[in-house]
Image (tube, grey):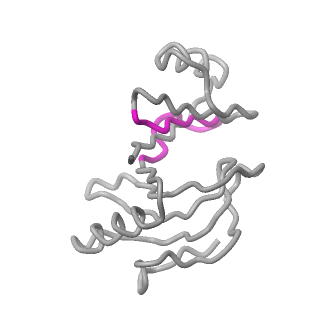
Amino acid sequence: MKRLHVHMGVKKFDDAVTFYNAIFGEGPVKLKAGYAKWAPADLGVNFVISQTEGDGGIGHLGVEVQEDDELTRLGMRLRAVDAPLLVDGDVSCCYAKSKKAWSEDPGGITWELFHTYGEDEAFQPKRIGSDKVEGFEGVEVIAR
């Protein structure tokens, strides 16, 4: 099953947690200082907020997949329509270990494509393994 991913920056973090608890009818599945993630089973969304000093709002959208081969198929569909695609590979970010790639829609909205396979203690992104994702050969790789 794929899930829509939404990452929003918020200025009033505690107030936002209270608000989104009410929206989703449950608390976050992950709550850290300045970071909260909801994954309601009945909604099919991976919804994240993080505290920001700047303008709040949508940081990026994304698609979370459950297996590496789904990530490969998603990337290949984007390549087939000449969409920009940047491969991040194995990274630790947002308290998780994931394989990631990024794209941008025609309107300039950033999309994160990812398969999460573990937990991590770090919020800031860092490379933890290969920068390769099977099926994405020849695609520009993001330097971290």
Q: Main secondary structure of the magenta part?
A: strand
Quarter of the image with the C terminus in it: bottom right
| In the displayed structure image, the side of residue 27 where residue 79 appears, left or right | left
Residue at (70% x, 50% y) in the render: 119
Examine the image and state in which quarter residue 75 appears.
Answer: bottom left
| In the displayed structure image, the side of residue 42 where residue 22 appears, left or right | right
Q: Is 70 or 10 nearer to us in this picture? A: 70
Depicted 135 relative to depicted 2: above or below: below
In percent of width and height, residue 33 lies at: 75, 33
Depicted 34 relative to depicted 1: above or below: above
In percent of width and height, residue 45 lies at: 43, 36
Q: Which residues, given as a range, are shown in magenta?
A: 44-61
| In the displayed structure image, the side of residue 57 where residue 108 appears, left or right | left
Residue at (62% x, 31% y) in the render: 29
Depicted 137 relative to depicted 125: above or below: below
Depicted 61 relative to depicted 88: above or below: above
